[in-house]
Image (cartoon, helix red, strand yellow):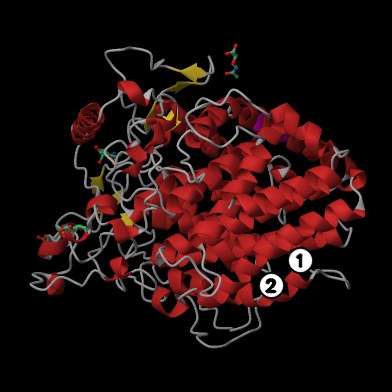
Amino acid sequence: MLITWAVVVATATAVCATSPWSSLLLKLKDRNGSNAGRHPLPDIDLFQDMFMALSDMQDNYFQRWLGTWPHGIDWTRAVMSTHVAATLRTISDELELNRPNQGVECTSRKEDVIAGYFADVIAYYFAEDAFSLRNQAYDDMLWVVLGWLESIQFINEHSRFLSGTASAGLGTTPGAEAWYGSRWIPAFAHRARIFWELAARGWDTKLCGGGMLWNPRLMPYKNAITNQLFISASIGMYLHFPGDPNASPFGSGANPTLTDNHRTTEWPPHDPIFGRAAQEAHRWLASSNMTNHQGLYADGFHISGHHSGGNNTNCDERDEMVYTYNQGVVLTGLLGLYQATGGPAREHYLREGHTLIQNVIRATGYDLARNRPIDDGRDPTRPIPPWRGLGRLGVLEEACDALGSCSQDAQTFKGIWMHHFAAFCAPGALLRSRAAVATPAGAEAEAEAEAEAEAVRARHEADCRRYVPWLRHNARAALGTRDARGLFGMWWTAGLLRLAAVEAEMVEAAAAAAEEEEEGDGQVVDYRNLGVPMDEVWMREVDLPRPVPMPSLEEEGEGGQKPLTGGTGGLGGRDRDNKTDPMMGGSGVDSDKAGVWDPNLRGRGRTLETQGGGLAVLRALWVVSGHEL
Ligand SMILES: *[C@@H]1O[C@H](CO)[C@@H](O)[C@H](O)[C@H]1NC(C)=O
Ligand SMILES: *[C@@H]1O[C@H](CO)[C@@H](O)[C@H](O)[C@H]1NC(C)=O
Ligand SMILES: *[C@@H]1O[C@H](CO)[C@@H](O)[C@H](O)[C@H]1NC(C)=O
Ligand SMILES: *[C@@H]1O[C@H](CO)[C@@H](O)[C@H](O)[C@H]1NC(C)=O
């Protein structure tokens, strides 16, 4: 990994030394590095760290001859390709920012870098197991939609940069000399559209007055993730999908309740069907009572009595489990709804997002008003600070992190949170509106609307700026988990702990205490880490009992996937997820050279998914800290 990075940075530094690229980096630099001395990598610029996280991810985990990450599973691969495309967008933005100051040679060197990783994205388009994904849960399908929409946005922005028409608004028609990448837009758009249609079949109005079902093969369960994904994917389709005239091969039409029996196989861009679906799903989620006493999304709702044939149709049995990604995906949807809606009332979408972000930050144990964690971590009797609901010591944490018991699903979650947070707080995001509705007539009204939009923008950006120190704190923690090869660990908090003073038992005790606390809160089923319970609450009658568990396909590596559910812990039940199996994709690198215990070697260890998380937090910091410049 060092080779690619060294070559790129050395070349870029030599050629681009005079550009403000270097001074920009200096401003954001934090040379202190909480782990100086422990980790052999130099504490270098954030942009370079981000770039290195990307190149390490691709060099260590991506197999070009297969066009995929063999140790991923379908949905985590979809998320990883989203991270790659998003990072390319960020690198492209950086080029755009500094366009006037760079020589041709400098720009073309960086262009090589972008094109190289974009080739990985194209390769993955063919390696993605679209056929298997068609038969998975609705959330699995929606990650696919988000991934290709991200790639389309990258292509559009990069094409605009290259053709010098940077101020072209939301238009998706590339100019005559379009970048070659734009030739892939129809393919990516087609896949996004197919998977949106498939997923939209999960929209159900018979139970709970609406909402997406999680999985058609289980008892009805309406969860946060599927609904948040549907909001974000639908509004993303409305804003960024360029249309799709390709009726092949499965043009079967979407859910008629959402599409007014729209039967066409040709979708135009900005079809209002997508926008209405997003609004409807948001309305349902917002009134679903899915947030807990800390203002965080619980996982989802069962319908009590449903399994015994009762006629209850209300979402009334809440699984109180709290995961990081359930607090994140909706942020992209809220931003999109703001961008797509007219009128002053649309600011409520942004306010909802900021409230959620602030609830998350608080639940990591961080005081935004004072810009520091509420626990200082220096208490010698408490080397592991207390759990605060979604983290400790001001760092985002999954409940399974401290125990090292996270599944492949959970290893992906924090990166997802960071990705959607970055989208919500990206500087300039509010300028890219597509207010199709309610354009006020008259110059005076127009000026008024403009002033109003400006005020909204100022409030939004001021809030986003406030999150930067917290975000930097999280990035520093994550950087502290890198091993000798530069690979990120799962449990970011460990990057800030004085591990010499921490022993395994203390971690386990702290984690157990956190778990107990959660359980005091009502019904908590951590099915994402422990597997879906084989009981009547979750399983359909016909699937109970199941004497022969499904074989654990996922552990067979490449191409392995459970056909029926998303993620680890599917219908095979709780015992199938062997956390100690070294073949599960852990890097197996022992960074314990200095004799310091490394809690990130436990469980699945360092994986593609933990690397994606490291990349996402660095990228989020790079993007959001743009508000400070
Ligand atoms: C960096 O280290 C110096 C000296 O140890 C310290 O005074 C300073 O506060 C540190 N800065 C940050 C941002 O941690
Ligand atoms: C919201 O959900 C909680 C937890 O299930 C429940 O205790 C509460 O009664 C619900 N509130 C409403 C208004 O349904
Ligand atoms: C279904 O609902 C009706 C009316 O609310 C009620 O009388 C009946 O007992 C319910 N049936 C079952 C099986 O719960
Ligand atoms: C889990 O995997 C390890 C290593 O392959 C093996 O030794 C152990 O027996 C497995 N445990 C179970 C419960 O399958």
Residues under numbered marks 2 and 1 in contact, where contact means CB atoms less than 8 Å apart? yes
Judged from the image, the secondary structure of the residue bearing numbered disc 2 is helix
Q: Residue at x 48, y 84 (%)?
A: 252
> Main structural element of the magenta stretch: helix, strand or loop?
helix
Up the image or down, 66 lies above or below 478; here it is below
Q: Mark 1: which amino acid?
A: Thr
Q: Nearer the viewer, residue 575 or 535?
A: 575
Q: Residue at x 50, y 66 (%)?
A: 144
Q: Tell me if 235 is positioned left or right of 450 in this view.
A: left
Residue wearing tag 1? 172
Q: Position of residue 395 (x, y in %)?
A: 44, 30
Determine the image quadrant of residue 152: bottom right
Q: Report how far apart the C-alphas of labels 2 and 1 lie in the structure.
A: 10 Å
Q: Position of residue 160 (x, y in %)?
A: 82, 60
Segment colored magenta: 456-460
Q: Mark 2: which amino acid?
A: Ile
Residue wearing tag 2? 185
Q: Residues within 10 Å of mark 2 (few under 14, many from 20)?
A: many
Q: Position of residue 523 (x, y in %)?
A: 19, 42
Q: Nearer the viewer, residue 443 or 464?
A: 464
Q: Tell me if 583 is positioned left or right of 143 in this view.
A: left
Residue 485 magenta-drawn? no
Up the image or down, 176 lies above or below 476; here it is below
Rendered-image quadrant of the C terminus = top right
